[in-house]
Image: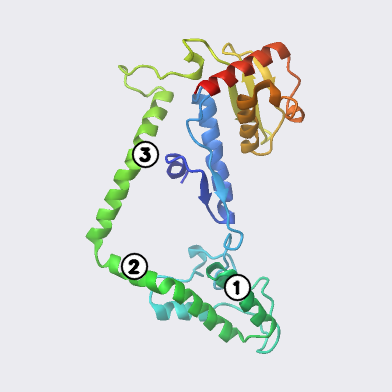
Amino acid sequence: MAADILMFSADKVPVGRDQVQHIEMCRDMAASFNHLYGNGRELLHLPEALVDEHVALLPGLDGRKMSKSYDNTITLFGARDLMRRQIMSIVTDSRAPGEPKQTEGSAIFDIFRAFAEPEETAAFAREFEQGIAWSDAKEKLFARIDAEIGPMRERYAQLIAKPQHIEDILQAGAQKARAIATPLLHELRCAVGLRAMSAPLASTPEKAAEGAALPVFKQYREADGQFYFRLATPQGQTLLQSKAFQQPREAGQAIARLKKEGAAALAALAAQLEPAPDEAALHAALQVLVQEAAGA
């Protein structure tokens, strides 16, 4: 999963709420790789989780998290009658027709909301307040899902009947993916020292600008789980040390601001920075980075 995300420099990754920790692990891997081999460069882009709160975690037929492991899923692309039977088997409480029903915690309502427009969802909520029978609510849910999935189900059946066509699509997609992934993979192999012996060394920030060495930002994570960065000379002398950040993107945003604004950003970021051991050297280093960024 991490390889699929990082290989294509994804910015936003749509996931359920229960998958957010996987994206955080992916970010940790990328940040660690950049710290060890990046030499000041972002070789691997750090992605962010994109969670739609309305469909972040759908309930299954039994009210638990929808999962194949629990065998409580709705087979969207199976037979239409099978999908209807599954929906009609959704577990509900004992409230009779005419009794107001709660939308909160209702699997029927949560699944309906994942497919419906806001206006449809609001109307369905009013029917819950008016005491819609559970059987009628399930029929409405089935009709809404079937209206959305029906055309897709037909297309799915057409594709399944033509396996060679599917293979052609997959091969075309693989070719497009390789065009993106191969150059990055080559850069990563060179960064860790797996390049061909005859290949020239890649230029790095320290060797840029007519061989002049540049100060380098290093972003890392400590054992306390917090994120930090420091600015060091090419010889390793610390010019600036940050305080702890809860999220790596916050540290990255601070670094980006320092590279862009230089010493002018120090006042605004003062609460997030430790006192500089040598302010004159720090200002000079930041000025070099600002000029380098402007030249790029």
Q: How much space separates mark 3 and mark 1, taking CA atoms?
A: 41 Å
Q: Position of residue 251 (x, y in %)?
A: 64, 33
Please tell me whether mark 2 or mark 1 is closer to you in this view: 1
The furthest residue to the left: 164
Rate crowding at label 1 as few (under 14), some (14 to 19) or many (20 or more) other CA atoms within 10 Å: few
SS under mark 3: helix
Q: Which residue is mark 1?
A: 119
Q: Considering only order in the chain, which callout, 3 or 2, is on the residue closer to the N terminus?
A: 2
Answer above or below: position of 261 versus 249: above
Answer above or below: position of 149 versus 49: below
Rate crowding at label 3 as few (under 14), some (14 to 19) or many (20 or more) other CA atoms within 10 Å: few
Rate crowding at label 2 as few (under 14), some (14 to 19) or many (20 or more) other CA atoms within 10 Å: few
Q: Amino acid at mark 1?
A: Glu
Q: Residue at x 48, y 34 (%)?
A: 44
- Left or right: 239 as drawn, with respect to 145: right
Q: How much space separates mark 2 and mark 1, taking CA atoms?
A: 29 Å
Which of the pair 285/158 is nearer the observer? 285
Please tell me whether mark 3 or mark 1 is closer to you in this view: 1
Label placed on residue 180: 3
Q: Amino acid at mark 2?
A: Tyr
Q: Position of residue 97 (x, y in %)?
A: 65, 89
Q: Residue at x 47, y 30 (%)?
A: 43
The furthest residue to the front: 294
